[in-house]
Amino acid sequence: MKFFKYPSLENHYRNKYIQKIRFTDAVDKEWVATEKLHGANYSIYWDSRSGEIRSAKRTGFIGEEKFFNHEQADRVVYPKIKECQYENGYLIFYGELCGGNIQKGVDYSEEQRFVCFDIAVVRDDEPDKLTFFSYDELTTLCDALGIERAPEIARGSFKDILQLDNIFNSKYGVFIAEGFVMKPVVTHWLPNGSRMAIKSKNSKFSEKAKSDKKPKKPRELSENETYYIDGVVDYLTENRLNNVISKKGEVDKSMFFLLMGELIQDAIEDFDKDNESNFKDLDKPERKFITKSLQETARDIVKRVI
């Protein structure tokens, strides 16, 4: 089996991305919105021919390392997935590991559980390609196997789904949901090969916030340094750090500097996406200075969280 990272979702406020979709026939198709769960990205790989089944986090297969209490969810969902037979490749059930102590501010359940939001197949004749089920195929298979799936919020046109309010009570209880994910009922791709899928998160769960404390500037800065330091600092938030941690599992103070670095890296990547810039195009001394200048803010956030 080969690991396939789940394709990233684009934020609903990235207007240039939205415009790219508007110039395709996908705007005339039916779209669906499902609740975005606030947990840890999780997937289960199943080959019914060999009987091989494996679990994975956001970045790769789970080995001997601890990843929350995923075994609790596996014990429930593995037998259900094993009932599915597919003869031309292996299946990947993408979803969210949620509940328990995975994330703060939500109360899905005391136990950790797997909630499916996508299914893909890796066919023998296309071993390097993901082929996603349509949303209706996903719901049919999950319901037949008894696998929990992300709650459906609405169906409709691209325009109507995009305009949905992202502040609403979760289907799991009396608390605000993280937001919703929208995609065509039948999978569509942009010309650049990226899958059409959008996340609309409300401000409570935003990974961006206006920073009251700007990084110190020990000298006169270049234009690039000013641009990145003043911009990226707003992307250094506790919500972002919690999402970074969710990709790793349980953490402790020995991982302090690792988390600092990954928080800064994740913030820069999102800043680049929002502003169509490329940090890697900068000279190495500039990149090093920018990263160092953001460390104090990142350090304060990691201190508060762990």
Image: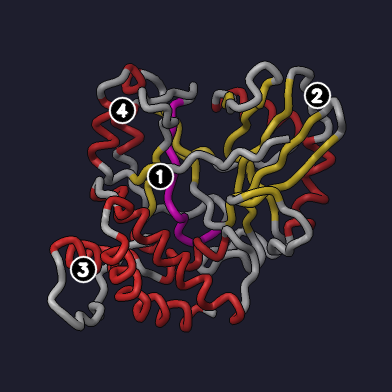
Separation (CA) of disc 2 from disc 1: 31 Å
Identify residue type, mark 4: Ile
Q: Nearer the viewer, residue 125 or 66?
A: 125
Residue 85: mark: 2
- Left/right placement of residue 293 relative to residue 171 reads left
Q: Which residue is mark 1?
A: 199
Q: Quadrant of the N terminus?
A: top right
Q: Residue at x 20, y 80 (%)?
A: 217
Q: Nearer the viewer, residue 90 or 148?
A: 90
The mark nearer the N terminus, 4 or 1, is 4
Q: Which residue is mark 3?
A: 230
Quick one: SS at disc 3?
Answer: helix
Identify residue type, mark 2: Gln
Specify the segment rendered in magenta.
173-184
Asked whether residue 201 is drawn in magenta, I would say: no
Identify residue type, mark 3: Asp
Q: Nearer the viewer, mark 2 or mark 3?
A: 3
- Residue 255 lies, in percent from the top left, at 58, 75
Separation (CA) of disc 2 from disc 3: 53 Å
The mark nearer the N terminus, 1 or 3, is 1
- Residue 183 lies, in percent from the top left, at 44, 32
Residue 21: mark: 4
